[in-house]
Amino acid sequence: MRIVQHPILTFARGKKISFTFDGRTLEGYEGEPIAAALHDAGVKVLRRSIRLSRPRGFFCAVGKCSSCLMKVDGKPNVRVCIEPLREGMRVETQRGKGELIERG
Amino acid sequence: MREVEIAIVGGGPAGLSAAGIALQTGATALLIDDGQHLGGQLVKQTHKFFGSKEQYASTRGIEIARILEKGLEGHPHLEVWLNSSAVGYYPDGVLTVLKDERLVKVKPARLIIATGAAEKMLAFANNDLPGVYGAGAVQTLMNLYGVLPGRRALMVGAGNIGLIVSYQLLQAGVEVEAVVEAMPKVGGYWVHAAKLRRTGVPILTSYTVLAAEGREWVEGAIICPVDERFRPIKGKEQRIEVDLICLAVGLSPLSELLWQAGCKMKYISQLGGFAPLRDGNMETTVKGVYVAGDSAGVEEASTAMVEGRIAGLAAATSLGYRIADAQRLKEGLWAELEMLRRGPVGQKVREGVKTALINQDSDS
């Protein structure tokens, strides 16, 4: 959910764009962290822990804690709390450690 | 390899202030930050600051960030690298920076480490569930991006951050069910506590959180009073209905680069963890490596700005740059620090800083 009215702040939001999360089309604002757009859409579980497959979400918001690692456009271990959202991004829940991508 | 006069790691209040004064002397600086914007954590701080005019008292943190940044904008002797993480510092004085997915080598003549701090975790059952956040993360999400972290919150910790962020949650339209604090009294400033209390939010002292409940995310929390030795009192557990548990249980300095540089470190609980020993110039035990702000010991943005100026001034003058009345300026900055650290709230920090300061008499 977005904050619509705030006693102190106004929010300068970028262009409205769409992206996908596990195949589902969602909307967000260009340039905001991917995690902010996911939060707005009510997506709280961002990845599964490596051994026990426990749900993991947003925690530190500054790219330090590794809780929010996701697969973005095929690339694993992206810190979505600081990665800017772009049009058409393919965002996926990450399971396990993530695979290295071969560059062609 | 890029050679620079002064590299500053961290573009928060300390790093920006260090850059400002270094540029004033005529030195050139490279400011490196891993975020998308300068200002560090100031950019989400909607409350007004205390202190005196010099530290922008009664100005909101978000405005201070703009003022500091504006003062540097377009300066011909300043280069800013955003989205760039300083990941290593080597024995030959080379700093490696991850920039645009490439590792870039930088060789600074002087290095100022102003990397800030990270939130501490608290041990309780299910503390890894989504919906358990650091208080700073909640601030970022709400105040920077305008997204609500949840509907009903439990705040853990009644220090300044816990009190301020609770109030900001209310401002954003989130209900705060309670603030729990393990200590028998509120740790933060009385004005913040009073402001929150007036809104009807209960501040429960000698209370802790025992567990988060929920399958995929937080759906509730178990809170419980504790005895004088912080042991939960059996049979007094209560469940509260929340979807957000916010941790404000302190910060610890981000000290990786200081360790890599080989700076002598000391565990100083009053400063939040391991902190580097430093002298009156904020220079660490490794020559040419300076520290400022929360990475030197967790305090406030106001003291971080002053420490940044001390470090920036010292680094620049050690390179031969001159500024009128440098000695008087430095003494004035230390007097400001003393002023900001006085009173009962500053006692912990005063003790901590005293332990970390070395060679106080030497004046380089």
Image (cartoon, coloured by chain):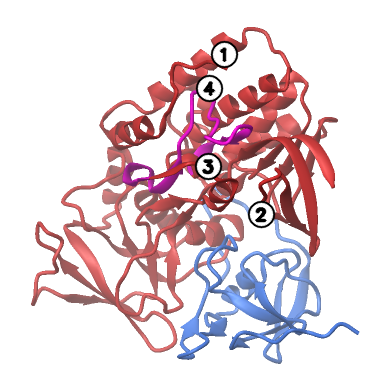
Chain colours: A blue, B red
The residue tagged 3 is B263
Residue B199 point in image, percent of width and height = 30, 52
Quarter holding the N terminus of chain A is bottom right
Mark 3 Cα-neighbour bin, 10 Å: few <14, some 14–19, many ≥20: many
Q: Are marks 4 and 1 on the same chain?
A: yes
Q: Chain of mark 3?
A: B
Answer above or below: position of B83 versus B319: below
Range of the magenta residues? Answer: B267-294
Q: Is residue B244 visible?
A: yes
Q: Are marks 3 and 1 on the same chain?
A: yes
**Residue flagged by tag 1: what amino acid is it?**
Leu
Query: Which circle's residue, 3 or 4, is located before the other in the chain?
Result: 4
Question: What residue is rendered at 27% in x and 57% in y?
Answer: B201
Q: Are marks 3 and 2 on the same chain?
A: yes
The residue tagged 2 is B88
Indicate which label's residue lies in the foreground, 4 or 2.
2
**Residue flagged by tag 2: what amino acid is it?**
Gly
The residue tagged 4 is B54
Residue B331 point in image, percent of width and height = 50, 14
